[in-house]
Amino acid sequence: MALILSASVGAGASNQADDVEALQKALQHAAVLTLDHRLDPGPADGRAGDATHGAIARFQRRLGHSQPDSRVDPGGNTLQRLNALLGIGDINIAFPFTSTPSHAYVGPGSTMRAFGSSRSGGTRAHAGVDFYFPEHTDIRAIADGTVTRGPYDFYLGTRALEIDHGAFVARYGEIAPDQSPPVQEGHRVSKGQVVGRVGILKDSKGSLVTQGRLPSNMLHFEMYDKTQSGKLTRASGTSARHTNGSPFYRRRDLIDPSGFMMRAPLPA
């Protein structure tokens, strides 16, 4: 259910007790969905103290706000993005593979595979998470949806698909080229349905691209909360930004998929 505020909550706001408590409960849920305990304001007691202000600010930083105001206004961007996140949490999401990847994509050891990791010498941030699997491993839809774009050329000889899953759009990237792709633009897909296969990166000479000692065969996976529309890849001036200020070169409704993927069960 969407969070509705009768008045603003946070720094300099009226902070009506019912509104504050409702926002605190929403932030608690956001902390669970994202696996980011810093978003938890503590007890939902209806009092907008430092813990609540801090949780709002940390949520705003996740959205790329360089100067968070620790305030949630009815009809404002922070409330819109929070409600979008909660709506995604209502979707029954499955993992895009029937087994776990060979290397970590969050936490210790995730390195280049993690959301927000440094790219191009720190001039951009990684816009998704990378799941390492053998080449041509089946990739499955994480929820019911409709293919809205693709397969199209993506990166170093691989392709990408964009699927609208209702509350969010997912980009399934670095998939293998296929003369007869399992799904195409306009197709309806069901959760667990094969939508592509793991690709492998090759340079202009046809040589395999590696990351360290690892071959670069993966699913590159991105999520967007649909608070914006249009092309997913963007120029720096219209891009979402990491908490450190680096551009993702992606649409501003980009979200970190890590928490959803970590919580998603393997498909049957």
Image (cartoon, rainbow, N blue to C red):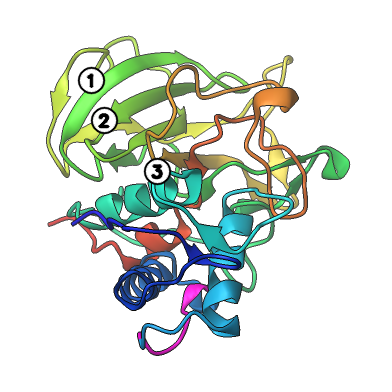
Q: Relative to 6, is 112 on the left or the right?
A: right
Q: Mark 3 Cα within 10 Å, few/some/many (few <14, many 20+)?
A: few
Residue 162 seen from this side: yes
Residue located beneath label 3 in the image: 75
Relative to 195, say whether 83 is above or below: below
Find out whether the residues at labels 2 and 3 contact each other: C-beta distance under 8 Å: no
Residue bearing mark 2: 195
Extreme residue toward the top, this view: 179
Q: Tell me the quadrant of the picture where the N terminus can be found.
A: bottom left
Dot 1 or dot 3: first in sequence order is 3
Which labelled disc corresponds to residue 91? Answer: none
Q: In this view, does 252 lie to the left or right of 261?
A: right
**Residue 80 point in image, percent of width and height:** 40, 45
The residue range painted magenta reads 39-44
- Give how far apart the Cα atoms at labels 1 and 2 are: 6 Å
| Mark sitting earlier along the chain (1/2) | 1
In front here: 113 or 78?
78
The local secondary structure at tag 2 comes to strand
Q: How many labels does the image show?
A: 3
